[in-house]
Image (cartoon, rainbow, N blue to C red):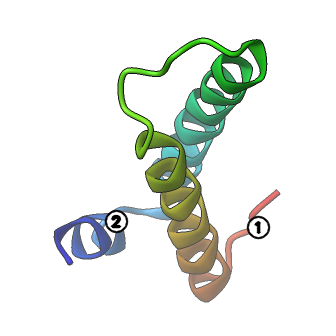
Amino acid sequence: MKRSKELQSLSSGELQKRLEEFKKELLKLNVQVASGANTANPGKLRQTKKSIARINGLLCGKGGSSE
């Protein structure tokens, strides 16, 4: 997977930054779903959740805190 290898090459600080970005994006997507608006890409929600899980796993493995 290209995304996993890309994330593995990042430092803990960069991973934290990416994690915050994905969490903000997830919040926006959840608001769109809750309001009943049609999303441009319905699979984006699932991809974002998986990306957050990947980053949390990498941070746990590198010894960084995920929270």
Assign the N terminus to one quadrant of the image. Answer: bottom left
Query: At 37% from the left edge and 21% from the top edge, which residue is drawn?
Result: 40
Locate residue 34, reporting x and y percent.
77, 22
SS type, badge 2? helix
Locate residue 57, reporting x and y percent.
60, 79
For residue 65, which quarter of the picture? bottom right
Q: Earlier in the sequence, mark 2 or mark 1?
A: 2
- For label 1, the crowd category at 10 Å Cα-Cα, with few meaning under 14, some 14 to 19 and many 20 or more, is few
Left/right of residue 11 with respect to residue 45 in the rendered view? left
Locate residue 66, reporting x and y percent.
75, 64
- What numbered label is drawn on residue 49? none
User: Is residue 59 placed above or below 27 in the rendered structure?
Assistant: below
User: Is residue 29 placed above or below 8 in the rendered structure?
Assistant: above
Residue type at tag 1: Ser
SS type, badge 1? loop
Assign the C terminus to one quadrant of the image. Answer: bottom right
- Residue at the disc numbered 1: 65
Mark 2–mark 1 Cα distance, whole angstroms, equals 16 Å
- Residue at the disc numbered 2: 7
User: Is residue 62 placed above or below 53 in the rendered structure?
Assistant: below
Left/right of residue 33 with respect to residue 42 in the rendered view? right
